[in-house]
Amino acid sequence: MKEYNHKEIEKKWQKKWKEGGVYKTTEQKDKPKCYVLDMFPYPSGEGLHVGHPKGYIATDVYSRFKKMNGFNVLHPMGWDAFGLPAENYAIKNKVHPSLAVKKNIKRFKEQLGKIGFNYDWEREINTTNPEYYKWTQWIFLQMFKKGLAYESNEPINWCPKCKTGLANEDLEGDKCERCGTVVEKKMMRQWVLKITDYADRMLEDLENLNWPESIKESQKNWIGKSEGAEIEFKVKSSKTNDKKNNVIIIHGCPSNAEKEMDHRTRTYDKHWQPWIKNILEEAGVKVELPLMPHPWAPKYEEHKKVFEKLDINENTILIGHSCGASFLVRWLGETGKKVKSLIMVAPWKDENDENPICGEFYTYSVNGNIKLQVENIIVFTSDNEEEIGKDTAKLFKDRLEAKVKELKGHGHFVQRHMGTDKFPELLEEIIQTPKITVFTTRPDTLFGATYCVLAPEHELVDELKGQIENWDEVEKYRDEVAKKTEIERTAEGKEKTGVELKGVKAINPANNEELPIFIADYVLAHYGTGAIMAVPAHDERDFEFAKKFGLEIKQVIIPCADDSKNPPQNGLEEVERETVIVYLKDAETGKYALLNWHGTLEGITTGIMGGIENGQTSEEAVLSEIEEESGITGVTITKKLNWITSARYCASHKNQNRYAIAHTYLAEVKNIKSQVEVSDKEKSLHTLVWVDENEVSDLLTPDHQKFIWKQIQKTTYLDGDGRLVNSGKFDGMDSEEAKKAITEFVGGQMKTTYKLRDWVFSRQRYWGEPIPIIHCEKCGAVPVFEKNLPVILPEVESYEPTGTGESPLAGISEWVNTKCPKCGGAGKRETNTMPQWAGSSWYYLKYIDSKNDEVLVDKEKEKYWSPVDVYVGGAEHATRHLIYARFWHKFLYDIGAVNYKEPFERLQHVGLINAEDGRKMSKRWGNVVNPDDIVETFGADTLRVYEMFMGPFSQSVSWSTDSIVGPRRFLEKVWKMHERINDQELKIKNDDLERLLHKTIKKVSEDIESFNFNTAISQLMILVNNMEKEAEISLVCYSKFLILLSPFAPHIAEELWSMIGNKESIYLSLWPSYDESLVKEEKINFVIQVNGKVRDVVLVNSDISEEDAKKLVLENKKAQKWIEGKDIKKTIFVEGRLVNVIV
RNA sequence: GCCGGGGUGGCGGAAUUGGUAGACGCGGUAGCCUUAGAAGCUAUUAGGGGUAACCCUGUGGAGGUUCAAGUCCUCUCCCCGGCACCA
């Protein structure tokens, strides 16, 4: 028998497989399919190291296994060759990227070829082929057409070394993920994809994917959904408002004019006009409310004289009520006077109204043919349908609406009777109050907001410039912040900084309190609304800021802990109690007094505590409780805790649940001698103990007391839910309920916010897909006609980045200058290219139909092969490739290009292989192991088995050339065993071996399915070790074993397979099945325990009955030794496993 | 800080999901074979005690539940990965 010569065997079979075309994808539609996919590599110049193939070996094993189990298998490979790595390599080595890529691909393919993969190379794709990127461009165009690709001018991440803009996903902290350079913010026109539109769906569909939990978490985190509310805070200025607008109110004709008029002031106090005048004047608006002549019988001619004397100009807002409104319309129509706004309040009366005075509106506007020079018209129609009749009201409203549209083209209608006391729309129009819109996830804490913070960049700051008294200081701070990088701004543990905007205040809409406004860099401009309400009592960051700036901290949530030892019982009445808890310190020893409770509360340890009696202050309650429970007097209260806490528990002696609100104190006593006698009753309830400070937390038993103790030591904010306090009518409400209630109360909006930002999609580099857009002066950004795709990446003399923010493509005028596809005029091509992630966002679809030039992918084929059944790759793609690809896929689903909502059904992480020194394999460290060398020395099969055997597949491990001999020895054994095959003997003689074979088939099958390759191989080794002991090995057993081995070591398996007389490739044979009855052991090692300790192990039939087992124990000498002379209390029997005797 | 995954011999790692802890492999030790080495083969290899039969201890640490805990619960320490002033 010849030696195991791996070189010869591997070379021979690799050639035969290629020539025989065994790995060509089969597509019989009646068979189930299995799409097994690797994350395709970018072909770097360094070639493969030994870590790269690990994932490819796994997919190879898996797909071979599936193939032999009757599946049509799709297992393709391709190249992700656009992007910075290839381009930088090309620049460094002074070759054109396309040449470099070609060369690198060739080298990669050679290296992969030596390992013996079953890839179907007929479906190979390359993202840099025009036939491929035609479709990448096509997808972009579809997105553009759906409004998902847009141009934007925002500060983006600019890497000064790579000289290109980067998406958020391309950063590691504040550094470029590629080169480690700190990125800058740079304003730049860029293409952006609206990935945020898909945030919710990507989040939702994550649930059903068979993906590692860690990746799902990362994606959830990255998408960062949080639900909260947007709430508006009005800004009040202490300076008089310098608004240019003046308001003139023209009252109507009160139904009872003479009676209602205050004859002394000659105004109508009971009407809304003086009220609104007050509000507006308080807000700094100049208001006139002229008294019109003959209020009880108004006449237009009289009004006209008054109008002419008023200061009505283009900044004027006119408010007319009833006939006042009608006269104004007529007057404006007649004079053509320009005004800013006309607000008509209930200018009603139908045209048949016999009162000619109020009919003016109809005469001169609805029925007349006039033009008004008014910027904005607002009409409040009456909703008092009873008064004017339903039909009339509707008719009137419809006509009025039509008329105003005709007059101005816009204007809006609010159906509201003016007798009510709220008309915010009206006031908004006039006052134009600046507002801070904040985003919060905790609207329940609104009453605890004690200041507001804007991001320094917030545009409201500019708007308020005139009102801010310390503008110099504000500007200085903004400059400082602008200079910092994101990381410097957000570094943890950094002292909070900020500047108050003096002269302006925010109004808390919940309680109308005036709050100071700050700008501070702890508030980020790009998240939420760029503004927050600060609730220092319940938010860590606000708390720190408030402490530093000495701002008010106001508790509005009482945290509540249900006592786990004594939880509230369902169905019992809940009684609220005000209580005190005090932690008393002995000033001399530093120890604290705690109570160990007795009776029904046995086992409970607390601080000194008790209820506050009627008429007592809480301080008095503290002193009296200490005296009653400990007898100690002369106590000084040293601190009242800022926070009120609470607990719910069951007071079983009173048959009630209690909600105890606890005021907490620290107290100290200097001389414990001055004691009074503790009553017997108190003594029977508890014992006082003194303990060290660091023991207190461990000893306290009720959860909320532990919590309080922690709060005492931290003196910090309270996060979490609870009941509301200091919150007006919401006091006592649970925070969860209050979130909605308070948001509604202040007219806020429930709102969902995401951390995910839109995808910055343009790169200012050469080596990428050209963005298929033409810019035309007339038509703007125009898509290239689909029939003109692909837009070929032109040859260029210098492909190095320009650094000016323009791609090298911008320099090729003959390429840039083209015709606008829309108008035929002069147009310029978009010169930015797509990022590296573009081509990889959909490549898995092209494998399905790689040669199709008509469509992206044939839908029928896609329906058969999609989704990818198993996708194998590194965890580093969690928040880039895997988010982008899901986004594109969902988009393609929406436009009907694909059949399924998700691209990758199951995802498996491949753990990295580090170098022997534990570091990453890298040229830099000189610790790279080249697979070519391993294949040369040990063989591809050994490499494959070793990499699968190293450890759990998803875990990273260090390479060890020493350990590789194990798998090699294993294959040698397999090889040598061939000598002992008895090909006459078809049956396995040895029953045990047959059972082991079936067990092995089962285990290996299950383990490959679940990617536990290491244990599958270990089981194969066990089988081989046992087969080795046999003098003769049956052909059946050996054949089945070879099939089990073949996914891992295809070359040696194929060679031995043919040596035992098979003509067809082992790849085409059927995976063996196992007999369930043979998987179970016939005899088992049955464990005999005494008191839970193993005392003996005996070989018995696996179906031993409980009675036999018990007998067995009594007969067992070793067990008897432990049982003798003792009573058997209990015997536990576990079927097929053990018997345990308790004595 | 938050989220996720871990911690088992000298090393990589198994453990039927609560039932013999250390499978399989590397390494080590002793022996066989050999002129010698390599390879191979045999035995042994968690730690401690004992001539031995055998006994005790043991899965980062401390408690707990259970007849029985690497596995479940509570607290705690350490390592790896992700996110990080996200309101």
Image (cartoon, coloured by chain):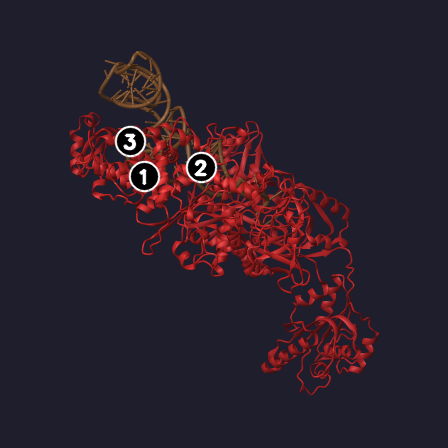
Chain colours: A red, B brown
Q: Chain of mark 2?
A: A
Instruction: Locate the N terminus of chain A and report the quarter of the image it occupies.
Output: top left
**Residue wearing tag 2:** A111
- Residue A960 sits in quarter: top left
Identity of the residue furthest to the front in this view:
A19
Write down the residue under mark 3.
A975
Measure the C-alpha gap from mark 1 to mark 3. 13 Å
Of mark 1 and mark 3, the one earlier in the sequence is: 3
Is label 3 in a helix, a strand or a loop?
helix
Question: Residue A746: which numbered mark, if any?
Answer: none
Which of pointers 2 and 3 lies earlier in the amino acid sequence?
2
Residue A1000 is situated, as x and y percent measured from the top left of the image, at 27, 38
| Secondary structure beneath label 2 | helix
Query: Residue A116 in the image: x percent, y percent?
Result: 38, 39
Q: Position of residue A479 (x, y in %)?
A: 72, 44
Q: Say which amino acid is labelled 3.
A: Trp
Judging depth in this view, the residue of A286 and A12 nearest the camera is A12
Chain of the residue under label 3: A
